[in-house]
Image: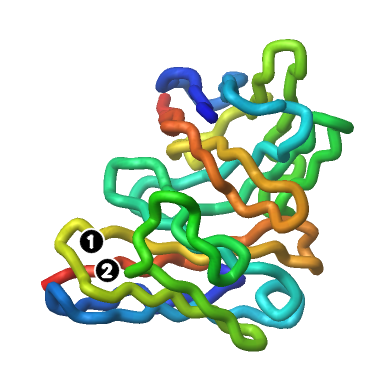
Amino acid sequence: QSVLTQPPSVSAAPGQKVTISCSGSSSNIGNHYVSWYQQIPGSAPKLLIYDNNERPSGIPDRFSGSKSATSATLGITGLQTGDEADYYCATWDSSLSAGVFGGGTRLTVL
Amino acid sequence: VQLEQSGAEVKKPGESLKISCKTSGYRFPSYWIGWVRQMPGKGLEWMGILYPGDSDIKYSPSFEGQVTISADQSISTAYLQWSSLKASDTAMYYCARAIPGTKYLDYWGQGTLVTVSS
């Protein structure tokens, strides 16, 4: 059971928009920055969003992040088949004094 | 920035193991290094994180006492080790650089597959 809760799967058609939620608590998301990672099966994870809504160099602006209270959301617009992957949220947890990941969400682009 | 992990390992239960993560392209003492486990078909799990500058280490409660994280500043390399492996340690292990402060993981190694089987 992950400390951060994500939906197991989401799906949408190419060109459409999808959002992935990440729910936590005051000890983690509520008081710390959230980051998001993309993992294509068979590959290492890749940083998509940091500090709630910042994109690293090279990440297209189709990817966006937001945070409100103890929840965070990853948005992906203009879906492409290459976006099919597992997506994970992460943050620090003050109670655990450790980082935590969400359980991951499998995105299917139909 | 590059993180190069050691190769795949096949071990028997009860054996010890130390895997490595050699870094380059940045000032090793100034960034945290984290280790992440991914069991077969499962999600990412935060194991622990080390700051080479002062050897501060923070373990996730689930991994405290089960593994040891260390580093050698002289060769810009971090390590993850087990003293007695179990079959349940079979997984892919990733190292990643973590930014001071928010500790997000910006650069990742390619992963080391550890298989523990009798």
Question: How busy is the neighbourhood of tag 2: few (under 14 within 10 Å), some, or many (20 plus)?
Answer: many
Q: Residue at x 57, y 29 (%)?
A: B85
* Foreground of the two, A18 or B19: A18
Pointer 1 residue:
A84
Q: Which residue is mark 2?
A: A107
What residue do we see at 68% from left, 81% from top?
A: A25
The numbered mark 1 sits on a residue in which chain?
A
Q: Position of residue B118 (x, y in %)?
A: 42, 25
In x, y percent, where is residue A98?
Answer: 73, 56
Q: Chain for mark 2?
A: A
Q: Quadrant of residue A7?
A: bottom left
Q: Residue at x 50, y 38 (%)?
A: B108
Which element carries disc 1, helix, strand or loop? loop
Q: Is residue B69 above or below residue B47?
A: above
Q: Position of residue B92 (x, y in %)?
A: 44, 37
Residue B82 in sight here: no
The label shown at residue B45 is: none
